[in-house]
Image (cartoon, rainbow, N blue to C red):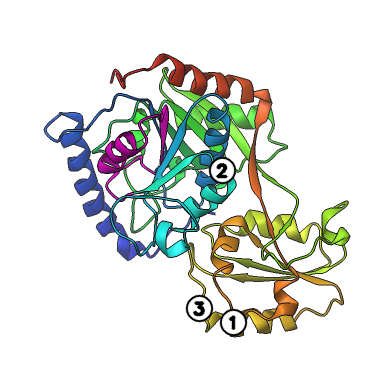
Amino acid sequence: MLKHRSIFLYPFSLVYGLITAVRNILYDSGILKSAEFSIPVICVGNLAVGGTGKTPHTEYLADLLRKEFRVAVLSRGYRRRSKGFLIASGSPKVEDTGDEPLQMYRKYPDITIAVDRNRKNGIAMIMKEKPETSVIILDDGFQHRRVNPGYSILLSGYDRLFINDHLLPYGNLRESKKNIRRADIILITKSPESLQAIQRRITVKEIKKYPYQNLFFTSITYGTPHPVFESGNTDDRIFSGDHINGTGILLLTGIADPQPLAEYIRERAGEVVVLSFSDHHRFRDKDLVKITNAWNSIKSKNKFLITTEKDAVRLREFGNIAESVRSASYYIPVGIHFLNDDQAEFDNLIVDYVRKNKRNNRIS
């Protein structure tokens, strides 16, 4: 659901909109310069704050391209404690890279995962330290106008479309809706699998995409649960059939939009307790009391703690969880699925761009 705050914040949204509009005008007019680079740069981002499924879509792109190209992913590294440019290597911690880059590093060790708040500098450093790189995926960089990407993918959640939203702080938008013009592809994420053709047509009409833009619908898919901790054991009650049917579940999340996962769990468990923290929440000792109380409130004899892959990255560094909870803790990997058999078309657009663009020569 779209979150609109107090109406008294609306005037501040007008001021914020003016500031972002002036900034975009300065970049669009060339007064402020955007850097271009000699290798393909694909930007993945959104207009709204969080909750669009950016990480699984970034991972999809990385997995698609790594089969043919040397891929690097550049992220800001949100809430990391390290400074400047960093390439993940060895056994980094969340405080070094942030949770999402660390998740991708562990999943795709053959891909360069780098973090830098200054994306222009980050791209330059990747090209210097990893000259074999064929393509760079710019994670959450749509508003980073200091870089002019060769290809831009804009995400918007189906249940919180940007066309129905407002600018911060009254709404959730980082910039005006009209800036969708900078996107080459628009992805409507978290779409219902049962979405009818008439509903897709209505959404496309409402968005009013430009003729040069492609628009696709994707839905979220949930994989087989995996142990969060190395001491966790595979359990047939989770890994077979509906995975968690007939058990008690503590769903522990620290993500922007836990609702879709909560609904997925509730369809498959007789008892569900949801414990939600803010996005990118860093678990502390004081949170252990809440986790323990929620765990003990579950009445089912067979019970498990289920979390997201991103939360699992942070939980692994939280050492005070009781062994009875640790051994029953699992994360559910998240993937994406293209509706209307559009996956091949999307894949071809991405791969063709990387193959054909030796230089970053976008025509505005």
Residue furthest to the front: 90
Q: Position of residue 74 (x, y in %)?
A: 39, 43
Q: Position of residue 249 (x, y in %)?
A: 76, 69
Q: Amino acid at mark 1?
A: Leu
Residue for badge 1: 288
Quadrant where the N terminus sits is bottom right
Q: Residues within 10 Å of mark 2 (few under 14, many from 20)?
A: some
Q: Residue at x 35, y 31 (%)?
A: 131
The quadrant holding residue 95 is bottom left
Q: Earlier in the sequence, mark 3 or mark 2?
A: 2
Q: Position of residue 191 (x, y in %)?
A: 62, 40
132 falls in the magenta region: yes
Q: Nearer the viewer, mark 1 or mark 2?
A: 2
- Tag shown at residue 108: 2
Q: Residue at x 54, y 44 (%)?
A: 109
Whether residue 135 sits left or right of residue 222 in the image: it is: left
Q: Earlier in the sequence, mark 1 or mark 2?
A: 2
Q: Residues within 10 Å of mark 1 (few under 14, many from 20)?
A: some
For the record, the magenta segment spans 116-144
333 falls in the magenta region: no
Q: Are marks 1 and 2 in contact (CB under 8 Å)?
A: no
Distance from Cα at disc 3 to Cα at disc 1: 7 Å
Q: Nearer the viewer, residue 183 or 105?
A: 105
Whether residue 310 sits left or right of residue 170 in the image: it is: right
- Tag shown at residue 284: 3
The answer, for residue 160, to whether it is visible in the render is no
Secondary structure at numbered mark 2: loop
Secondary structure at numbered mark 1: helix
Determine whether 70 is above or below 306 in the image: above
Quadrant where the C terminus sits is top left
